Amino acid sequence: MPDQDDSLLLYLNDAIATTRNKESLFRTVTEKLRLIFPFDAVTIITFDAEHQYRRVFMRDYLGELLLPDSIVQRNARSPIEATPIEHMVRQPGLHQYDLQELQQEYSSFQPFMALLASGMRYLTVVPLRTGGQLIGMMSLVARRQPEFAPADTDLLEKIGSLVAVAVSNTLAFEDIAKREQQKTMQLTLNNALLRIKERGELFHTIATEINRVVPCDYFGVRIRVPSTPTRAFAEFGKEPDGNFVALDEDRDGVFPEAEAAREAVVELFSRPGVYVGEAFDALAEQFVLLRYIREQRGTRSILCAPLHLEGEPVASLIMASRQPDAFLEDSLELIQSLVPQIRLAIQNVFAFEQIEALRTQLERERTYLIDEINDTAAARFGEFVGSSAVMQQVFTRVEQVAPTDTTVLITGETGTGKELVARALHNHSPRKERALIKINCAALPAQLIESELFGHEKGAFTGAHDRRIGKFELADGGTIFLDEIGELPLDLQAKLLRVLQEKEFERIGGRRVIRTDVRVIAATNRVLEEEVAAGRFRADLYYRLDVFPIHLPPLRERPEDVEPLVRHFLERFTKKLGKPVRGLRPRDLKALQRYNWPGNIRELEHVIERAVIASTGPYLEFAGFSASPAPEKAPSGNSGRLKTLREQERDHIMAALQRTGGRVSGPQGAAVLLDINAKTLEARMKKLGIRREHRAD
């Protein structure tokens, strides 16, 4: 039937020339073929140029699903080597096969097993050539053995040539469309990179654009820095309305060993791959996390693409879907073509966030330093006055340890200048360009000290209306001065020890570990060895703080420093208060040198300030100041009774109250004189049994 054959060839040729829709075109080819040749299924596969891989281009089972998606995935690339396709590629023309005979030679080839199980017995393979190049093959599968005359074979090969042209054209059109699609998406992502700086908004845009071409239910980028757990950089889930929403990183924390489960899949996610259907199910049996998302979220497909960031971080883009065949090899190729833009997006976000973090920290430091300057305008290292031998030793130790990062413990009575030493250590260290952050551990209620030190997240406790940045985070790169460290509660001592040892902490109510580079300087007016023995201070924390101790002697033990200190304060307050220069009578100087100075240098400073304010004549007037002689030192070996620390503390507070007329708080109160918080002083007085009637004589 030459005329009929020619008509068929002309019809198919016209269809190929005029039809652009692949499904419509090959439905026409299948219908016309079945009019002439009996077969139950047709499959067209294509080859790469080297004939190493094959793809299913089109298949039509004429209403019957013979091969499940898990066996033959459309557009999925599979190797040809060691398969019957390798043998078929070598055949020059149309060839017929008995599937049972092929099955004996290729017993593990799953498509043949599935076809035989469906009752198929015979396979006719038509090579697809165009321009002399083999680009694929068309296979016709039948239950009954077809009878082909030589003319039929010739017609099938001619039809094969036409189909080859159609396949070649379709592949070319698809390639052009894919390139246009890729360029459009790259342009969209580039525009987003130029326009959007905020992490959440930028990656929401990226997820939305990619979803237009490769639909997914989950889009995420995960990053792991060496020696740290894997963390979500950006994660989004699709809502029922099709929009993406940001996901909480800790949403999986409810199932056991969530962190270990995430770490187990790091290697899997660090290489490109598409896992769908049964392949995903197999992985779900191997990895706890994949089994969890399959059972809890219905995930059936995942796509992984490594992002290859510069440096040591490991990053991967991960997409997931509830559809068992959501992703193809083409999907992975498209995503990998977008990797440069996504990698640039991550690098830009890192840079913008680092700049913003530095700007925020510098602003916080600026605000903090302005407050510090206003509060402690007089606390400069140049005012570290003292010519006595014991103070020269202090200066030497400060010079020795200041250039290092060594932890320093400053001890001494209240008012001896411990904060001044801390400032000197910071100002003469490599950290001097960053902030010196101070916190008085005795000035805050115990329940607030932890928040002050480490910060808290919004809603961490009643009253936590906003996130708070703690002093350790604020001091990153600088120095933190923990004054009155002996007042720190035991439970916080353990947390402080962790910061000193591990250089990391967590905000109250937070799960993110924050690393900090801080030099710690601590100070106390207590004898910490005695506090350790009494169980009020952790021994391990004490030894961690007492790396390089500096002890400040009380003023009564260095009377030779009184005169230079007096003249120093006199000069400062005369200028500050705009008062005329007044002289100092020798008898007044001797009285100041004989005084016991329970409040040490701070008390002397206040005495001189009051004298400068109150004096009207040519000399300083110390109205109301009674300089009682300093107690004589007991001879060596004296067995006279020593006062207990409690008695000494009580006498010290009573002396301060006497000096202030019983006033506890306010500018002229005992709390200022003793350099402690007024509420703390009230608590000490209650503990020591100092009642209101005892506050003043």
Image (cartoon, helix red, strand yellow):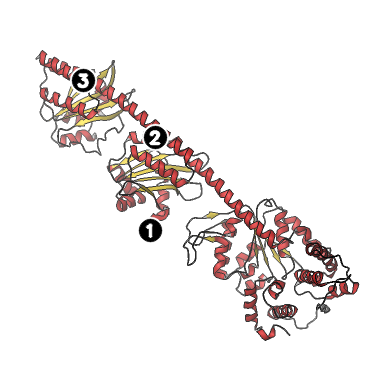
Say left or right for 351 vs 90: right
For mark 3, what is the residue? Answer: 160
In the rendered image, the quadrant that contains the C terminus is bottom right
Say left or right for 306 vs 60: right
For mark 2, what is the residue? Answer: 185
User: Front-most of 484 and 669?
Assistant: 669
Q: Residue furthest left?
A: 1
In the rendered image, the quadrant that contains the N terminus is top left
Instruction: Check disc 1 and give the amino acid type.
Output: Val
Q: CA distance from mark 1 to mark 3?
A: 58 Å
Residue 600 appears in the rendering: yes
Element under disc 3:
helix
Q: Earlier in the sequence, mark 3 or mark 2?
A: 3
Q: Residue at x 49, y 39 (%)?
A: 309
Q: Quadrant of residue 379?
A: bottom right
**Where does residue 402 sit, x and y in percent of width and height?**
72, 55
CA neighbours of label 3 inside 10 A, class few (<14), some (14 to 19), many (20+)? many
Asked if the residue at tag 2 contacts the one at tag 3, i.e. Cβ–Cβ closer than 8 Å, the answer is: no
User: Front-most of 449 and 494?
Assistant: 449
User: Total marks drawn?
Assistant: 3
For mark 1, what is the residue? Answer: 254
Instruction: Check disc 3 and give the amino acid type.
Output: Gly
Residue 518 appears in the rendering: no
Q: Earlier in the sequence, mark 1 or mark 3?
A: 3
Say left or right for 201 vs 48: right
User: Front-most of 675 and 302?
Assistant: 675
Q: Residue at x 78, y 74 (%)?
A: 597
Vertical placement of residue 141 versus 636, above or below: above
Q: Quadrant of residue 147?
A: top left
